[in-house]
Image: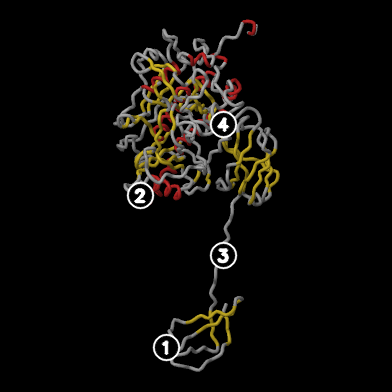
């Protein structure tokens, strides 16, 4: 469009500047030509100037995606019944649908109504498991991408969630590198002949090929598995990143867990801009994800690198490579009697498959000779293994032989798979890392264990958290030491992670161990003060700590068949200690022997 605007003419002077006047709603705009004013001169305005108007683009409008705020009803839902998804920005429903995920399923729901703030949909009559929680989200029907958040859920009536998790575990989906939700990533296809896959490093950092997590094969899916699926967005309630490096982390290392190799490679490409390089990488098939260890540039604090990486890729599960410690120390036969355990019963724990992550074990000790024990060191080449004291003591409590003194392991006929991941640093320091713990969890997943004993603890770590979530969703019980930091100590992980069975220690008089942690996360108390068990060599030792209470709960869960509802049965049978009901000192109370390992019922009470 062209515009003609009449103007007034002034007297000509030594300088001229050509101006155009454009009328708009805000008034007049004067547009000057590049000619400069002469000193002392005036400007001359043409009587009529023809101009081409400036085109201004409209202010862009930000599009807000669907936001789910609630799923109703809040009580459990029966198959075939309706749920209402509430929130905002749902749109008209054209090209969109409601999907449920979690516990190995990915199902679309039929909806009967769809408005901008509410969707009525029907729960399918098949494909979901009773007692499980399922998360709800909105996806694009064309691309399959998630358009909304997926942190709101409903529960299917009947049964209980796996191992009594205190809150439903969030359904799993694959985040993009930038944090936006995406569809579940399928396993990477086999490279075509002649293609060269990206090289991987072994766990010793020698670039000698990919780490081999074992050849035992993957565990059965059971009632549905998330192994090989995606990862949810990382938690938002993470502790503040430590600015300075300290003894709680491996120097110069960040760890990241990715849902697939392609996702790991994409993140690595972005991380190079921060100066991060790949130090190690492994595809952990037992857990179904890829672990990458990044090398932090010299002169950069790990905390600064972590903050930068999280800002660059908010959807990535990135953390420092934290160190973890054993939760016991050297200090009767009271332990088994205290909880009514009679391990001599032939039906007590026979056939149970138990996993353990600890130090090495003296498998030649008389209390372990002839037991069904499979050990594996997962320490990198060149790393000095810690003394086998702690692992030997824990293993003997779980599966040890009966000796002349009356000592007997809790489940002598069980199969124990023990992973050695603890090293010696200097003269006294014994610890492991988040990376090595996850490698061990991956191996145990492949060995089809039912319960895993973790007599260890440390800070919260996203790598460990992701691995534990995978196993909990699969139905594997995780029992962990509550920690030996004292009454005012912060929570210890993985014990404090939802779904993990945190165990504290008591003595023969049912007093809590003086060094035991306190907290709402504690689930059970068990004997753990001055407990006699095996020591490397020929003898034994009295030990104390939440480390040594943990095997009693592990054994009880394994002997109960490690059923999803077994933990609830054990809670009901627990002997209440301290304040009435569950409390932060004793949890629900002292663990009691399950029926298979307790005193035989009187003949008059037996079924005829």
The image quadrant that residue 248 belongs to is top left
User: What residue does disc 4 label?
Assistant: 165
Q: Is residue 42 above or below residue 58?
A: below
User: Is 375 positioned to the left or the right of 411 in the image?
Assistant: left
User: What residue does disc 1 label?
Assistant: 38
Q: Sequence order check: which comes first, mark 3 or mark 1?
A: 1
User: Is 65 positioned to the left or the right of 531 in the image?
Assistant: right
Report the residue at 43% width, 38% height from top. 290
* Residue 59 numbered mark, or none: 3
The image quadrant that residue 47 belongs to is bottom right
Density class for disc 1 (Cα within 10 Å; few <14, some 14-19, many ≥20) is few
Q: Sequence order check: which comes first, mark 2 or mark 4?
A: 4
Q: Horizontal and vertical percent for residue 284?
A: 42, 34
Closer to the camera: disc 3 or disc 4?
Answer: 4
Q: Nearer the viewer, residue 320 or 170?
A: 320
Q: Is residue 151 above or below residue 593?
A: below
Q: Nearer the viewer, residue 467 or 103?
A: 467
Q: Sequence order check: which comes first, mark 1 or mark 4?
A: 1
Q: Horizontal and vertical percent for residue 266?
A: 42, 46
């Amino acid at each position: 469009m062209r515009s003609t605007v009449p103007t007034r003419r002034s007297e000509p002077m030594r300088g001229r500047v050509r101006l155009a006047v454009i009328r708009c709603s805000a008034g007049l705009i004067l547009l000057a030509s590049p000619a400069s004013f002469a000193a002392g001169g005036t400007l001359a305005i043409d009587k009529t100037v023809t101009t081409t108007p400036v085109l201004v683009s409209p202010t862009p409008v930000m599009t807000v995606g669907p936001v789910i705020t609630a799923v109703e009803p809040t009580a459990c839902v029966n198959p075939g019944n309706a749920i209402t998804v509430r929130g905002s920005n749902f749109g008209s429903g054209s090209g969109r649908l409601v999907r449920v995920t979690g516990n190995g399923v990915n199902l679309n729901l039929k909806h009967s109504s769809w408005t901008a703030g509410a969707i009525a949909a029907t729960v399918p009559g098949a494909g979901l498991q009773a007692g499980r929680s399922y998360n709800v989200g909105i996806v694009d029907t064309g691309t399959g991408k998630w358009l909304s958040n997926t942190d709101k859920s409903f529960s299917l009536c009947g049964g209980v969630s796996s191992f009594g998790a205190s809150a439903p575990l969030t359904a799993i989906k694959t985040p993009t590198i930038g944090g936006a939700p995406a569809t579940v990533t399928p396993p990477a296809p086999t490279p075509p002949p002649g293609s060269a896959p990206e090289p991987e490093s072994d766990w010793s950092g020698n670039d000698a090929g990919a780490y081999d997590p074992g050849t035992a094969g993957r565990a059965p899916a059971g009632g549905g598995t998330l192994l090989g699926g995606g990862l949810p967005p990382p938690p938002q309630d993470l502790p503040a990143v430590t600015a300075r490096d300290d003894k709680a982390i491996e120097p110069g290392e960040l760890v990241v867990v990715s849902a697939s190799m392609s996702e790991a490679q994409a993140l690595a490409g972005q991380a190079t801009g921060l100066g991060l390089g790949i130090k190690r990488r492994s595809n952990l098939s037992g857990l179904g994800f890829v672990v990458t260890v990044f090398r932090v540039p010299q002169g950069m604090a790990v905390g600064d690198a972590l903050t930068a990486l999280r800002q660059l890729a908010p959807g990535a599960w990135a953390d420092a490579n934290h160190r973890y410690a054993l939760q016991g120390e050297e200090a009767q036969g009271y332990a088994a009697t205290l909880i009514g355990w009679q391990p001599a019963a032939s039906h007590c724990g026979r056939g149970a498959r138990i996993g353990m992550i600890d130090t090495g074990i003296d498998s030649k000790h008389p209390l372990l000779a002839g037991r069904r024990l499979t050990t594996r060191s997962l320490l990198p080449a060149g790393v000095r293994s810690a003394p086998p004291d702690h692992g030997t003591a824990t293993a003997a409590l779980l599966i040890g032989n009966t000796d002349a003194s009356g000592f007997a392991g809790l489940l002598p006929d069980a199969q124990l798979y023990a992973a050695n991941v603890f090293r010696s640093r200097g003269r006294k320091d014994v610890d492991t890392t988040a990376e090595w713990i996850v490698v061990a969890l991956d191996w145990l997943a492949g060995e089809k264990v039912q319960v895993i004993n973790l007599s260890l603890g440390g800070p919260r770590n996203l790598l460990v958290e992701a691995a534990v979530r995978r196993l909990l969703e699969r139905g594997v019980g995780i029992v962990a030491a509550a920690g030996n930091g004292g009454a005012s100590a912060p929570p210890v992980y993985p014990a404090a992670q939802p779904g993990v069975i945190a165990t504290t220690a008591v003595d023969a008089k049912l007093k809590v161990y003086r060094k035991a942690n306190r907290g709402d996360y504690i689930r059970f108390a068990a004997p753990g003060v001055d407990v006699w068990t095996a020591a490397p060599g020929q003898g034994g030792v009295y030990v104390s700590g939440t480390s040594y209470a943990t095997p009693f709960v592990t054994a009880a869960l394994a002997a109960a068949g490690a059923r999803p509802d077994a933990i609830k049965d054990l809670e009901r049978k627990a002997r209440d200690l301290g304040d009435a009901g569950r409390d932060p000192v004793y949890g629900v109370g002292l663990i009691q022997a399950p029926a298979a390992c307790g005193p035989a019922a009187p003949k008059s009470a037996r079924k005829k």
